[in-house]
Image (cartoon, rainbow, N blue to C red):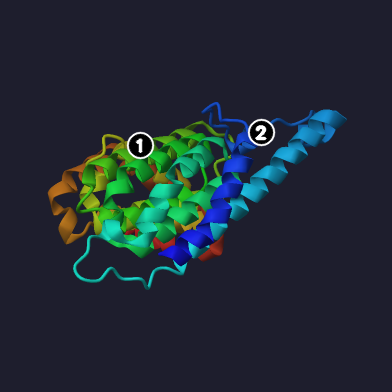
Amino acid sequence: EQLLHALVRAPCEQLAALLPHLPPSDGASVPPETAPRASDGSDVSRGIGGEAAATVASTQGVEEAVATQLALIGAAIRFSDTIHVGGGGSCAAHPVFAVLSYCWPLLQDASRRGGPSVLQALLELHGRAMGCLGGGLAPLLPSILEQIGTTFCRRPVVGALECLTQAIELYGESHEAPLSDTLERFVDAVCGWLASTAAPEAEPELLSAFFELCHRCLVFRPQLLLSLPCVASLFDAAAACVAHQEFQHTRAAITFLCLFLSGTDAANLYRESAAHCLQRSGGTLLRYCVQGLASASPANLVDHQIELLR
């Protein structure tokens, strides 16, 4: 425990010194494709005056330094996963839990101020903490889920989707309410973006991770997903991706839809949700499948689309 505290003390001191130099977020989420561009399509930041450009460079340097310190804390947690609390002691006595509690105000501040690299490092830290502590993370889990949800709505990053996937697998039975709330925020955010963007294939990694999250949720805790009020919007969003060109996220959407429509034993109580979606939008899904098979989709997606039609 003393060694772990010694390992994280210096990164925490660095975080305390660096974070005040990052501006707090205004909470607005800006889709990647709507970032400011010049009339010729180039990045506006290239034309910023010298002083402003220096400020941007300075902020980027601070963000890189903050991400590095978070990665160091995450590495210390990762190498603590073999520690076991003996004598029937509570998981709250685990040194990693104590370290997280010690770091928590700094982690909260990082989630409010950080850019994509900082948020990705923070979410990887949370993932390592879940893997290390398992159920012992329960006292902090509602706060972590709130942080993940707020982070994703502000700046959608793949790490948030991966982190929530891991949380559903580990805590789906014991923390259904906060997980359901966070999942609903994610689904609303991604479906809203897909419905409004002019470039729905601009974020293939994000969409792949999102549909993988939805698929894993159907496998482990189908009621979390199928009981959401936005499940019809999710079905429509996945259907719209069926005729996309990019392989990974399109396959992920098709894989999710196949399980959504075929169901599992655990999902039998919620079959009405899937049946309602198929009755409401089945024709649209069929049209996208035929469109993909006819011309829109690359050859390596044909087998997946045929499986969906079955």
Secondary structure under tag 2 reads loop
Name the residue at 61% across, 48% down: 14
Indicate the position of residue 55 as horizontal and vertical percent values.
76, 33
Which sits in the foreground, 131 or 48? 131
Residue 147: image x %, image y %? 41, 40
Q: Nearer the viewer, residue 182 or 96?
A: 96
- In this view, the residue farthest toward the front is 2
Residue drawn 33% across the image and 54% down it: 167
Q: Secondary structure at mark 1?
A: helix
Give the amino acid type for the residue marked by disc 1 in the picture: Ser
Q: Which mark is residue 233?
A: 1
> In this figure, which residue is indicated by the disc labeled 2?
35
Image vertical order of residue 154 relative to residue 15, above or below: above
Q: Amino acid at mark 2?
A: Ala
Q: State left or right for residue 133 relative to residue 269.
A: right
Quadrant where the image shows the N terminus:
bottom left
186 vs 121, left or right, is left
Marks 2/1 in contact by CB < 8 Å: the verdict is no
